[in-house]
């Protein structure tokens, strides 16, 4: 992850079981970024060496008034997967 705006809280838990968890919140400034901001916001390295299925699932919670929330489900079909030319640094 890179270029996280001020006021955003992003946490990553990289479990040894190859099940990573990413959580975050943005109380201010989320409306100030356009859709292009998220094009390369998060890079996930796909590891097929153990024969485990690759899938992404989660939700995004949005609100206008902090009273009523809307939950948007996210799955593997909702993300753009691409082979990157840049090497992954460990």
Image (tube, rainbow, N blue to C red):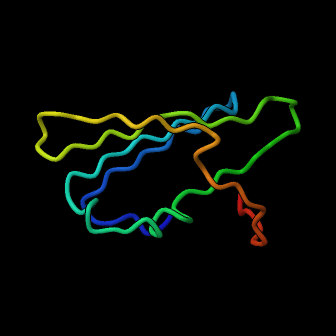
- The residue shown at (40%, 37%) is 72
x and y percent of residue 4 in the render? 39, 64
Left or right side of 85 for 72: left
- The residue shown at (78%, 62%) is 83
Near-viewer residue (70 or 56): 70
x and y percent of residue 67 in the render? 11, 34
On screen, residue 33 above or below 9: below
Left or right side of 8 for 51: right
On screen, residue 3 above or below 27: below
Q: How many marks?
A: 0
Near-viewer residue (37 or 22): 37
Left or right side of 74 for 69: left
Please tell me in which quadrant of the rendered image residue 68 appears. Answer: top left
- The residue shown at (48%, 41%) is 22
- The residue shown at (32%, 50%) is 9
On screen, residue 18 above or below 2: above
x and y percent of residue 33 in the render? 34, 68
């Amino acid at each position: 992850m890179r270029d996280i705006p001020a006021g955003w809280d992003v946490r990553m838990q990289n479990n040894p079981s190859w099940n990573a968890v990413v959580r975050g919140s943005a109380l201010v400034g989320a409306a100030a970024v356009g859709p292009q901001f998220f094009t390369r916001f998060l890079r996930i390295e796909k590891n097929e060496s153990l024969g485990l299925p690759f899938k992404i699932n989660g939700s995004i919670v949005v609100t206008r008034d902090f009273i009523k929330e809307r939950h948007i489900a996210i799955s593997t079909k909702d993300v753009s997967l691409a082979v990157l030319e840049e090497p992954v640094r460990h």
